[in-house]
Image (cartoon, grey):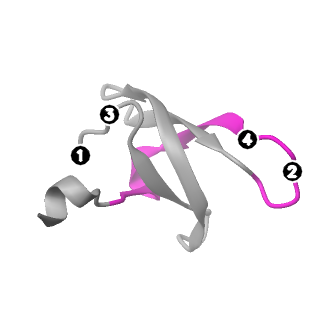
Amino acid sequence: MIFTPGQTVTVLDTTHKPAGDGIVQIFNPEAQFCDVLFQYPGKAKPESIPVPTYRLIPQLSDDFIH
């Protein structure tokens, strides 16, 4: 799957349950990882975290619905 910077995704935790939403910053197709801007519960600011693509679910935008 291809991810693009600025794309909103649902981040899955290590048990594959939704952990929250994030925004793709960088997609590395060779490594199958994305750097995602993600805000942990209880934290004041989001952090950039590396996430394997198999733990990301792309969210549909309104462009795909119409």
Q: Nearer the viewer, residue 41 or 35?
A: 41
Measured in 3D between alpha carbons, the distance from the residue under mark 1 to the one under mark 2, in whole angstroms, is: 30 Å
Q: Please state the extent of the stretch shown in magenta in the rendering.
A: 40-59
Q: What's the mark number on residue 65?
A: none
Determine which residue is flagged by label 2.
Answer: 43
Q: Amino acid at mark 2?
A: Lys
- Determine which residue is flagged by label 4: 46
Verify whether residue 42 appears in magenta: yes
Q: Which comes before the other along the chain, label 4 or label 1?
A: 1
On screen, residue 35 versus residue 61, left or right, reads right
Amino acid on which disc 1 is placed: Met
Disc 3: which residue? 4
For the C terminus, the quadrant is bottom left
| Residue in the picture at 73% in, 41% down | 46
Type of the residue with mark 3: Thr
Q: CA distance from mark 4 to mark 1?
A: 24 Å
Please report whichever mark, 3 or 2, sits nearer to the chain's N-terminal start: 3
The CA distance from mark 1 to mark 3 is: 10 Å
Asked if labels 1 and 4 touch by Cβ distance under 8 angstroms, the answer is no
